[in-house]
């Protein structure tokens, strides 16, 4: 029971301290790897949660919870992941409804954008380094993926195609 409480507390903390799904991956990596899952399991879980439809963060939470404590662990991680944003967004909505005409609200939201962008790039770089190392093929895939997303090709297609190319060219068979 203590381990389920630790799992609940970990996901509650991750979702209270991060601002979005992708941004929470870095914090979750720090909190979960070595405690609930291995680094390899985590990298695979990030890849799978990116390809599957739905919320990446919730899928990642359920995977880590399930890997740690089965179905009950997945449910505990899911509840802990849903609870903070639900309560926070309810409170923020009530406050913003009262302050919706204030100019500083728009400036506040604009100020968050660069910080979240840098956090996502930093997390992606850490996953890139740990996932397959830096090689010519990996760097080429990263560049091609960036160009494909810039040209508005759906992310799921880019990830699946990159995975197939990685399986073909980066396997040690």
Image (tube, rainbow, N blue to C red):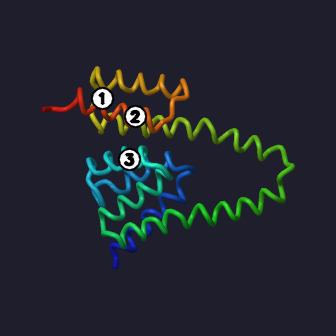
The answer to which quarter of the image holds residue 10 is bottom left
Q: Which residue is drawn at 85% across and 48% down?
A: 102
Mark 1 element type: helix
* Residue 124 place in picture, x, y as percent: 42, 37
Q: Viewed as shown, does residue 149 lie left or right of 163?
A: right
Q: Are marks 2 and 3 in contact (CB under 8 Å)?
A: no
Mark 1 highlights which residue? 165
Q: Which residue is drawn at 47% across and 50% down?
A: 56
Along the line of sight, which residue is nearer the eye, 155 or 21?
155
Q: Residue 46 got which mark?
A: 3
User: Does residue 37 sit above or below 74 in this rendering?
Assistant: above
Q: Do the residues labelled 3 and 1 touch (CB within 8 Å)?
A: no
Mark 2 element type: helix
Q: Residue 125 got which mark?
A: 2
User: Does residue 140 sit above or below 33 in this rendering?
Assistant: above
Q: How crowded is mark 3: few (under 14 residues within 10 Å), some or many (20 or more)?
A: some
The answer to which quarter of the image holds residue 152 is top right
Q: Viewed as shown, does residue 166 lie left or right of 55?
A: left
User: Does residue 139 sit above or below 3 in this rendering?
Assistant: above
Along the line of sight, which residue is nearer the eye, 39 or 155?
155
Q: Which residue is drawn at 71% across and 59% down?
A: 92
* Residue 147 place in picture, x, y as percent: 48, 22
**Where does the C terminus fall, quadrant-wise?**
top left
């Amino acid at each position: 029971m203590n381990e389920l409480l630790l799992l609940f507390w970990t996901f509650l903390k991750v979702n209270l301290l991060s601002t979005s799904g992708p941004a929470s991956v870095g914090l979750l990596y720090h909190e979960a790897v070595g405690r609930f899952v291995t680094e390899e399991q985590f990298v695979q879980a990030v890849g799978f949660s990116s390809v599957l439809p739905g919320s990446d963060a919730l899928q990642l939470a359920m995977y880590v919870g399930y890997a740690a404590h089965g179905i009950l662990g997945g449910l505990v991680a899911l509840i802990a992941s849903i609870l903070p944003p639900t309560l926070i967004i309810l409170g923020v909505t009530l406050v913003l409804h009262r302050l919706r005409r204030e100019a500083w609200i728009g400036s506040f939201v604009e100020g968050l954008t660069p910080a979240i962008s840098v956090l996502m790039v930093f997390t992606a770089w850490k996953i890139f380094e740990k996932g397959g190392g830096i090689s010519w093929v990996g760097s080429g895939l990263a560049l091609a993926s960036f160009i494909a997303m810039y040209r508005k090709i759906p992310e799921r297609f880019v990830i699946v195609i990159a995975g197939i190319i990685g399986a073909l060219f980066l396997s040690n068979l």
